[in-house]
């Protein structure tokens, strides 16, 4: 006599338009039928569809909000929404960690005074996720697998591969407080005003004669002045501040 085999539960899954890029092409419709195993959480189901949970906001089942631990049942209609913007990151001051592929974005965030740690060498996904947890930093990456690591404290997918759009994406998503010209773009340390005489041994004679205003990193001692590239940097800073503002009343 053959034993009875239960059919695997089937649900209807709807991904927010901005999340559909993570799914396989045949799963990008407004409403797709998805088979589950009857025991896995909704968070696991969403990740199996290709969407990192770092990108997920509200989860609605038949119109009611549920946690990621909800176990979907046959016939349920699930709506997966993206994160609300600006996204709140409770539990620590807002600061970031960027992987090896986001060096330009890291320098631009630092230019705006945003705390942005950066690994210039590939230290591996486990080490990045562990540092995120140890330092309570939001890990920014275009690596979906990295953003699914369980030891990660918080993370966010960077949707564009163009630095200008990457910066707008991060500023629009997290609304960090902007304090331009206060961080070292090389090491992320704080900058302080420096006199000409105090940095004279660290710059060339021509620079010493031409410029009068200097700043120095208190961590790595790198010296800054308004050199040939200052106009381009001023443009980047000006556009960011005009669109996103310094957010002086926000606290983290």
Image (cartoon, rainbow, N blue to C red):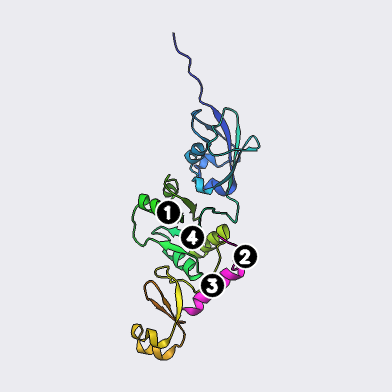
Q: Are marks 4 and 1 in contact (CB under 8 Å)?
A: no
The x and y percentages for residue 127 are 36, 52
User: Which label was assigned to residue 132?
Assistant: 1
User: Which label was assigned to residue 108?
Assistant: none
Q: CA distance from mark 4 to mark 1?
A: 10 Å
- The residue segment tinted magenta is 229-252
The quadrant where residue 15 appears: top right
Name the quarter where the C terminus is drawn. Answer: bottom right
Q: Which label sits in the foreground, 3 or 4?
A: 4
Category of crowding for the residue at label 4, using alpha-carbon neighbours closer than 10 angstroms: few (below 14), some (14–19), many (at least 20): some
Q: Give the camera-side residue of 34 and 181.
A: 181
Q: For mark 2, what is the residue? A: 249
Specify which label sits upstream in the sequence, 3 or 1: 1
Specify which label sits upstream in the sequence, 1 or 2: 1
Examine the rendered structure and indicate whether residue 177 appears above or below residue 218.
above
The x and y percentages for residue 60 are 62, 39
The quadrant where residue 11 appears: top right
Q: Secondary structure at mark 2?
A: loop
Q: CA distance from mark 3 to mark 1?
A: 27 Å
Q: CA distance from mark 2 to mark 3?
A: 20 Å
Q: Which label sits in the foreground, 2 or 3?
A: 2
The x and y percentages for residue 209 are 40, 91
Q: Secondary structure at mark 1?
A: helix
Specify which label sits upstream in the sequence, 3 or 4: 4
User: Which label was assigned to residue 95?
Assistant: 4
Q: For mark 3, what is the residue? A: 237
Determine whether, in the image, residue 126 is placed left or right of residue 42.
Answer: left
């Amino acid at each position: 006599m053959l034993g009875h085999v239960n059919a695997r539960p089937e649900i209807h899954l709807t991904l927010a338009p901005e999340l559909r890029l993570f799914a396989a092409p045949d799963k990008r419709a407004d409403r797709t039928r998805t088979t589950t195993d009857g025991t896995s959480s909704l968070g696991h189901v969403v990740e199996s569809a290709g969407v990192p949970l770092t990108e997920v906001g509200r989860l609605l089942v038949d119109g009611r909000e549920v946690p990621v631990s909800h176990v979907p049942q046959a016939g349920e209609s699930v709506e997966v929404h993206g994160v609300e913007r600006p996204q709140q990151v409770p539990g620590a001051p807002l600061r970031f960690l960027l992987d090896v592929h986001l060096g330009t974005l890291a320098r631009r965030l630092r230019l705006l005074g945003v705390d942005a740690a950066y690994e210039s060498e590939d230290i591996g996904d486990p080490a990045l996720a562990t540092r995120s947890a140890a330092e309570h930093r939001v890990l920014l990456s275009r690596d979906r697998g990295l953003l699914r690591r369980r030891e990660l404290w918080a993370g966010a997918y960077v949707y564009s591969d163009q630095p200008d759009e990457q910066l707008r994406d991060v500023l629009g998503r997290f609304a960090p407080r902007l304090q331009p010209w206060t961080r070292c773009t090389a090491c992320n340390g704080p900058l302080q005003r420096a006199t000409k005489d105090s940095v004279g041994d660290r710059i060339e004679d021509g620079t010493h004669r031409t410029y009068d205003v200097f700043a120095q990193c208190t961590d790595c001692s790198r010296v800054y002045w308004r050199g040939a590239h200052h106009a381009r940097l001023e443009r980047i800073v000006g556009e960011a501040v005009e669109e996103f503002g310094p957010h002086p009343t926000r606290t983290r």
